[in-house]
Image: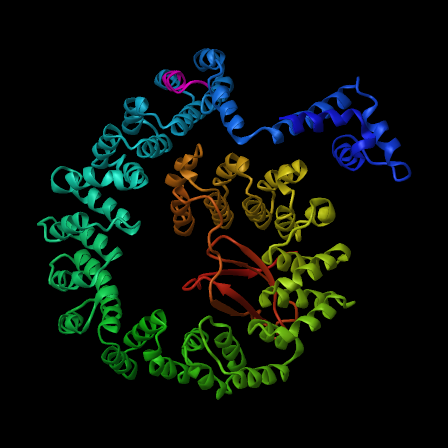
Amino acid sequence: MRSCVALASKLRYPDSMRPRAQLLGDTLVGPASATDPKAAFSARWRPIGSPVGAMALLQVAATLLFLCTPPSARAQRRAWVARLPTREAEHTLTNGDAASRERAARSLARRGAQDGAVSALVRALEGERDPAARASILASLAARSDAASTDALALVLSAGTATERLLAARTLGAIGSPEALQALIDALSGRRTNAAAEQGLRLAGERAVPPLLAALRAGDARVEAARTLEQASARGLRVGLVRSALRRAATDPDPALREAALLSLAHAARPEDEALFISALDDVSAPVVLAALDGLHATATSAAWPKLTTALAGAGETDRPAILRAMLVSDPAAAVSILLRMREGHDEAQRALALDVALDAHSAELRPVYADAWRADERSLEVASALGHLPDGAGVTLLAGGHGRLAERELAIALRAPGGKASASARRMALRRFDALPRPVALDLRALVRDPALLPELRSELASDAPPRRAQAARSLAVLGSSRGLPWLLEALHTETSPDAFRALAQAATDLGGGVPSLQVAAFLNQPGTAPEAMALAAQAPNALSDSWLRRLLRRNLRAPQPRVRAGAARALSLMRDVRAAPSLVAALRDDSPSVRLAVASALRSFGHASSFPGFTTALRRELDERVRGMLVAAAAAEPGSFDQHGPEVLRLQMTPQGQAPPAGLAADVLLPDGRWLRVSADAEGELLVPDLTAGEADVRVRLATP
């Protein structure tokens, strides 16, 4: 401690530590003097009697003392702070107004002795009627995770609102005592409480396995117990006891229980489960058969082939895709022969089904099916992507011989596919073909195949006098995906004045993880045509969360007249990780535009545990749009953090306005299924290429952009 006191005492002697004191003075008080550092330091610290000077000095001294305190002493101090008297907070919990009660509940999450704080929170919960205050009490009880609150939480789980039930169930799961777990087991059989109870039991982990096994053997919640054990199996709880119980349940007379048990086993399927899955193919319940096919997708061997062949002969349209996928696992060569026969027939539905199954598999054995579809010019870009995934590079060699209308696009998509191994000569040949195309198209395709030689050209294009060329270079840098281009984009943004070019530059910089302060892009933040890109760019600036003006602007733009601006504000709040904006986003779930609600739901998903936000459950029940509802369901229990919005797929759009040829630079707003809006410009032929979409997501909404 001696060195710490000596360091603090040096604040009286600026000559002995001028560099350190000057840094602290610059940070807390004002700018330094460039002429006389000693005089600058003295001037900054002389007005010690003023509130600013005194507070600054106290802050420095407190910081130095904290840094010099050993970790053990800090832990003792935290323990001492936790024992501070909390009578005022406990009194406010029952006598203050709603806002004061909410603040008092939050403070008891970290202050006061454990027993006293928990008792006060439980007493307050019994009589509290304000939803926000009740949510704060439940959150504080969750932070305490004390078994003394079990009875009160069990009551909330049975009679509270949907949000309160979820908070109570998760808290009971975190407590994990036998009494808490039994309360969750009892709630499993309730129609209103089973979803929350399942989440609490999953959170409890291994501690929940014994009561779940007991519920699986007898009771009203056998199906729910099997379904919850399935989640436990997915998290690694694949002990022999659990698997034996699930195997017995898979032969139970109740078809719902059989289905749940088979799905549980399918999530962690082992070779010894194959016989059970094969026998379940004879089940009279269609959901049970589909669950068995899920298991065979991971375990099928040649032993399953006879039963799969019989099942395929009598299968309906619903079961045939799953059976064919299981056959590809059981005997790939024989399954490919069946798919080729389906392709050779004249039944268009069978031809389409065979190609659907093949495109989902991305297997080298399926190359004959891909080649047949490519020669028939059927879904050629999807087929090109599948050919590009083949590990031996043979798919790229096949595409290199094509000379159709989309031959170069197909070649570029195949070369971008992950996992493919195209030869160096095939890449050189493709680049030569790209260079023969019009320059904008060539830049797009070279970026699509990640040609590193393109970087110097794009850097020079960013300095062009023509805004369309700058915009094209920015889009190509984003598609190229090289972080080396980010400094060039940020430099170009400093001087950009064209709205069209700014949109492309900002979108590319955001995709590459860059951001700039809101002050730098203030002019574009106030223009509806550029506001979404500007908001996303400013939201990724290093100190965006401390930019109060930007945070207020984003909340205000959630109510802007233009749907694209409202959706852009939601995405920017997500990029900023501004969880304090959750109430504004939940309110925005009442927006008339489904696209805006989708963007808002996506933002709430990134915050995690969205079902704990007041009003969220009501919005989920009210939502009618299928895509928005799916995103809200995913947001309800998602963990905090960004979720994957990118994949290996490339979408090609061809815009042809009726009665006229599409002009170069025609813009379109593309709504992706994850809630992102992209404003992109077509080339001279009205073509748009949108790469890096999640696999299987081809449902986009396109409309002509408005200024």
Residue 496, compared with residue 683, is above or below; it is: above
Magenta stretch encompasses residue 322? no
Magenta stretch encompasses residue 118? yes
Of 396 and 602, which appears nearest the observer?
A: 396
Provide residue 685's location: percent of width, then percent of height: 60, 75
Taking the image as shown, residue 402 lies to the left or right of residue 368, namely right
Residue at the farthest front position = 2
Our reading of the magenta stretch's main secondary structure is: helix
Provide residue 323's location: percent of width, then percent of height: 22, 68
Of 502 and 587, which appears nearest the observer?
A: 502
Taking the image as shown, residue 173 lies to the left or right of residue 400, namely left
Q: Residue at x 75, y 27 (%)?
A: 10
Q: Residue 383 appears in which quarter of the rendering?
A: bottom left
Q: Name the colouring of the figure.
A: rainbow
Q: Residue 297 appears in which quarter of the rendering?
A: bottom left
Q: Residue at x 30, y 29 (%)?
A: 157
Q: Tell me if residue 660 can be seen.
A: no
Provide residue 425's location: percent of width, then percent of height: 54, 86
Residue at the farthest right position = 35
Taking the image as shown, residue 657 lies to the left or right of residue 530, namely left
Task: Please state the extent of the stretch shown in magenta in the rendering.
Answer: 112-120
Q: Residue at x 11, y 39 (%)?
A: 218
Residue 87, compared with residue 662, is above or below; it is: above
